[in-house]
Amino acid sequence: MARFGMVIDTVRCVGCMDCVVACKTENQVPEGFNRDWIAYDVKGTFPTLHMESRSERCNHCDNPPCVSCCPTSASHVHDVGGVVLVDYDKCIGCKGCVASCPYGARFIHPDGYADKCTFCIHRVEQGLQPACVAVCPTHCMHFGDLDDPNSDVSRLLASRNHHTLLPEAGTKPRIFYLT
Amino acid sequence: MQELTITRHNELIDPLLHIWSWQIPVYLFLGGLVAGIMIISGWFVLQGRYKHTTFSTFYLPHISLVLLSLGMGALFLDLEHKLYFWRLFTTFQWTAPMSWGSWLLLTIYPALWVNTLIRIPERFQGKIPLFDRLSAELNKRPTLIKNIGIANMLLGTLLGMYTGVLLSSFAARPLWNSAMLWMLFLVSGLSAAAAFVHLITTDVYERVLLAKADNAFLTLELFVFGGFLTGLLTSSRVHVEAVRLLLDGPYAPVFWVFVIGLGIVVPLIVQLLAVNHKVKHTPVAPILVLAGGLTLRFVIVYAGQFSHWT
């Protein structure tokens, strides 16, 4: 079974927010909410500063706390690619999954259910790329099977330095940032 | 230095998480209170108090049924997808404390109800003949009555623990991520229940006994607080930052004044004087304990959402 993940090249990312707009359009994300966003992470001491721009979203963790805390199994790991999804018809809106996510990746949709990035699974199942990856003008975003050693994502991870967000939280994120 | 700027502004998530408002602290407080009442009521059943008074075996379970229903009502109000709440009872998710809690709450209702049948007060006898017959059958089986007492104590303990485990399972919130939280909520629930029974009972023996018991629970609560705070203070950076929200951060005034001072220390001193016959028993002490227990849930739920990993 595939294990989908994303690799984002922070050297190429310019923080243009095309990915954010593409996601909102593709997934009809309601006004005032975002499934993905841009983070500007500045580190160092003036004048030796380093800024990393990166596109963030649900990390589709290998050890997803949002799935293990869900009392109705609405939050689940999908058969295709191990993507973490929400079954809206099972969600009671208890917000446990929102509290359990150290990345703040989930929100409550105005219709009452928990919502978040789906890796555009409806597109991926048709052989397409997620909307954010497809529109990126600098081609800094890559999507594929992390278990396939010949996939773009695996080759990039084998050849470049990378990090994940909050590895100390123990969630084993599947979005990797090239540095 | 490190400065992180994000373009996300999701409601109730940014800038700081605030998904749970008054409903969850009220639910946790009432759940803890009912848990404590079940333990106390079960203990009185085991001691055979039902032979002398109907208060602990008839009125306390009835009051518990009302309080628990109010708590579950608050929980229901908190749900964002209310019409789907029944989904809780179509599955059992063993990794989800909320699933355990949902099924546990279902077992508590019959346990409380059967407790009310052990001894029906004279003025209610003959109102529902079926209940009278069941009560008569129960009283032919003293071992079964003891088992009802044990079941109430056991289920009450599980409920009291659950209210803490529910929060401590959220590792993403460092303040809640403590193995002491279930103990803190259980002891606090016992203390609140002892104060509640102390406040409303008409039985002098029970009032004095529960004032003494509450002193023990309040003292134990102080020790558990010590363990809870020390455990977080000696943990990782995010846990230290989380516990400092209570110690010297934005929640410190409420925590020290209303939870520790007026919620534990002052009523403990007043009740110690009362049980040693230095002052008369006063409803002020148990009222302070109950208010402190409610404030504790508010502080822990609100500050816990405030705590984060980044």
Image (spheres, rainbow, N blue to C red):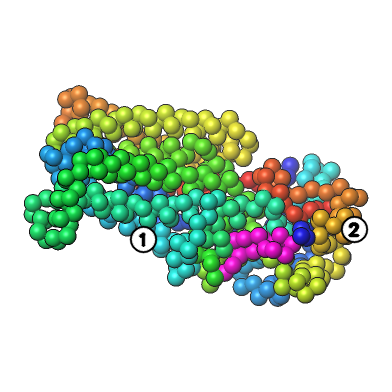
Q: Image point 43% across, 37% down: which residue?
A: B183
**Quadrant hosting residue B186:** top left
Horizontal and vertical percent position of residue A175: 76, 55
- Residues rendered magenta in the picture: A75-88
Whether residue B235 is situated above or below residue A175 in the rendered picture? above
Q: Image point 70% across, 52% down: which residue?
A: A62
Whether residue B53 is situated above or below residue A89 in the rendered picture? above
Q: Secondary structure at mark 2?
A: loop
Identify residue for label 2. A150
Query: Circle 2: is it few (<14), some (14-19), or many (20+) Cα within 10 Å?
Result: few
Question: Mark 2 falls within which chain?
Answer: A
Task: Answer left or right for B167 relative to A149.
Answer: left
Identify residue for label 1. B73
Q: Secondary structure at mark 1?
A: helix
**Three-letter amino acid code of the residue under disc 1:** Gly
Horizontal and vertical percent position of residue A166: 70, 46
Residue B180 vs residue B93, the one in the foreground: B93
Please report contact status of discs 1 and 2: CB closer than 8 Å, yes or no: no
Residue B219 visible in the picture: yes
Residue B63 visible in the picture: no
| Magenta highlight on residue B66 | no
**Three-letter amino acid code of the residue under disc 2:** Asn
Task: Answer left or right for B123 relative to B61.
Answer: left
Nearer to us of marks 1 and 2 is 2
Whether residue B15 is situated above or below residue B239 in the rendered picture? below
Q: Image point 79% across, 42% down: which residue?
A: A44
Horizontal and vertical percent position of residue B251: 47, 43
Q: Image point 40% across, 43% down: which residue?
A: B158
